[in-house]
Amino acid sequence: MGPYEVLEHYRRAAIRQAADDMRGLYAADAVHEFPFTPPGVPSRLTGRDEIVSWIAAGWRTLPLRYERYRTIASHDTGDPRTIVVEQEAIGRNTSSGREFALPNIVVLTVHDGQITHLRDYVNVLAAADAAEHAASALG
């Protein structure tokens, strides 16, 4: 699988919150980076186990469910293993029912059909807003 196919599998795993599927997408020594993070949030995860454990913990603790992704633009980089994708993760706050859209840019590199490096430029203000509304709905 090339990077576009891997990205589609990644999106489906995130929507289903399928840790085993996510685990199969990352190389054992993969790196997942968040260049813009608020205090207390890691900016770099190293290795499949650490990455998938962190993702799955978020699924368990936050009432935010992704329902779909919208691709705004995609860009080839000249390296057939790496793409840059501008996208939105669109979902719903399971406690309030409020819809949210989390804009981000993903720089994805794959080798042998697995993610070796992912830089996730999350819009931290949109993420905080979705989480705040989730917390407000909980009481």
Image (cartoon, helix red, strand yellow):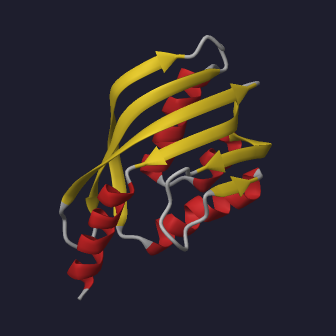
Q: How many marks?
A: 0
Q: Position of residue 132 (x, y in %)?
A: 28, 73
**Above or below, comparing residue 46 to residue 107 in the picture:** below
Q: Is residue 45 left or right of residue 83?
A: right
Closest to the observer, 98 or 133:
133
Q: Position of residue 58 (x, y in %)?
A: 51, 66
Q: Which residue is rendered at x = 41% and y = 70% of the image? A: 62
**Above or below, comparing residue 4 to residue 57 in the picture:** above
**Which quadrant would residue 44 be assigned to in this image?**
bottom right
**Which quadrant would residue 50 be assigned to in this image?**
bottom right
Quarter of the image for the C terminus: give it.
bottom left
Quarter of the image for the N terminus: give it.
top right
Q: Residue furthest right?
A: 29
Closest to the observer, 119 or 116:
119
**Above or below, comparing residue 52 to residue 96 in the picture:** above
Q: Which residue is rendered at x = 44% and y = 37% of the image? A: 105
Q: Which residue is rendered at x = 34% and y = 66% of the image? A: 128
Q: Which residue is rendered at x = 47% and y = 18% of the image? A: 75
Q: Position of residue 30 (x, y in %)?
A: 75, 44
Q: Is residue 115 left or right of residue 102?
A: right
Q: Position of residue 127 (x, y in %)?
A: 35, 59
